[in-house]
Image: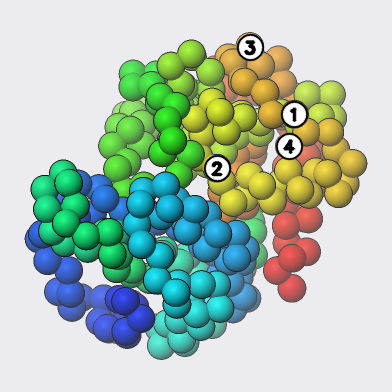
């Protein structure tokens, strides 16, 4: 088996090397943040947006940000890693930041460590799903709004539980709701609704993750004169929609084919998928 490499605190090591101890705060308390980043044709996509988001999240969690933790240095490390792992085209990159060991719930330090991993992806570019996703609600546990609800932390049990429900119901994805019963996101994506040629998406104040691809789609909509509204989404919003699609940094756009007894088309999804792939060349 090929010895895959990762980068731990700037140093190239084997992925299987035991560099992190059982006292690691990400393991013990979920005291961590992460970004999922797409590599397409050897190009790191939207990296400055990912770095900006994780640094804002680090500030929210009162983590110290090292001076060398910037877009240029992280890109340099990523490109070295993909070369070492012999990835020539597309990959998923995971950047994880966690507070250093020490303390129980109360940390002894706010200094951080970081880990960069890569996984090869066979498809080249953002690939739109041929068959529409079948989705439904996961409402057993609701997501509350707080200062950390919009960031991607290692405390992901809500999404794990939704994933288990997705599997048991044989769905492609589950839609999460907040305390007010508004639909805010899926297990790993933001959600967009199309009605009469306009876009609607959950506002950040409803508790959804502040997705990098979400911002990209909103910007693309503006440049293509597509009206976009940040508005709370309900079951009625979705059953009255013409289209529904999900967005994340790895897949780009994935269109929903069915929600409950409602079926959708995918014209807007096709358009955005084409526009996203224009940035990959």
Task: Give the mark nearer the N terminus: 1 vs 4.
Answer: 1
Secondary structure of the residue carrying tag 1 is: strand
Tell me if residue 4 comes above or below residue 116 in the rendering: below
The numbered disc on residue 229 is: 1
Instruction: Give the residue number, with chain letter if any, for mark 2.
Output: 210
* Displayed quadrant of residue 201: top right
User: Could you tell me residue 11's position as x and y percent?
Assistant: 32, 84
In the picture, which quadrant includes the C terminus?
A: bottom right
User: Could you tell me residue 92's position as x and y percent?
Assistant: 47, 65
Task: Give the mark nearer the N terminus: 2 vs 3.
Answer: 2
Q: Nearer the viewer, mark 1 or mark 4?
A: 1
Residue at 25% of width from left, 82% of height from top? 14
Residue 253 in sight here: no
Secondary structure of the residue carrying tag 3 is: helix
Residue at 13% of width from left, 59% of height from top? 102
Instruction: Give the residue number, with chain letter if any, for mark 4.
Output: 266
Task: Give the mark nearer the N terminus: 1 vs 3.
Answer: 1
The numbered disc on residue 131 is: none
Task: Give the mark nearer the N terminus: 2 vs 4.
Answer: 2
Instruction: Give the residue number, with chain letter if any, for mark 3.
Output: 236
Tell me if residue 159 comes above or below residue 277 in the rendering: above
For residue 99, side relative to residue 78 (left or right): left
Q: Residue furthest right?
A: 225
Secondary structure of the residue carrying tag 4 is: loop
Residue at 40% of width from left, 26% of height from top? 143
């Amino acid at each position: 088996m090929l010895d895959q490499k990762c980068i731990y605190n700037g140093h190239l090591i084997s992925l299987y090397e035991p560099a992190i101890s059982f006292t690691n705060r990400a393991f013990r308390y979920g005291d961590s943040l992460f970004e999922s980043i797409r590599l397409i044709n050897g190009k790191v996509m939207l990296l400055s947006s990912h770095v900006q988001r994780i640094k804002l999240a680090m500030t929210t969690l009162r983590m110290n940000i090292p001076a060398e933790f910037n877009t240029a240095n992280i890109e340099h490390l990523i490109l070295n890693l993909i070369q070492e792992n012999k990835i020539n085209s597309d990959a998923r990159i995971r950047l994880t930041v966690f507070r250093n060991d020490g303390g129980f719930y109360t940390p002894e330090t706010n200094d951080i460590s970081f880990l960069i991993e890569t996984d090869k992806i066979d498809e080249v570019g953002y690939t739109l799903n041929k068959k529409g996703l079948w989705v439904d609600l996961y409402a057993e546990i609701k997501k509350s709004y707080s200062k950390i609800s919009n960031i991607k932390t290692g405390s992901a049990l809500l999404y794990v539980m939704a994933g288990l429900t997705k599997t048991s119901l044989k769905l492609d994805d589950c839609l999460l709701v907040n305390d007010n019963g508004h639909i805010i996101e899926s297990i790993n994506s933001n959600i967009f609704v199309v009605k009469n040629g306009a876009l609607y998406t959950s506002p950040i104040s409803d508790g959804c993750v502040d997705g990098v691809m979400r911002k990209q789609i909103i910007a693309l909509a503006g440049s293509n004169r597509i009206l976009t509204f940040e508005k709370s989404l309900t079951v009625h919003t979705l059953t009255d929609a013409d289209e529904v699609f999900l967005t994340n940094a790895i897949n780009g756009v994935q269109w929903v084919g069915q929600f409950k007894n409602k079926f959708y088309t995918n014209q807007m999804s096709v358009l955005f998928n084409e526009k996203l792939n224009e940035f990959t060349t």
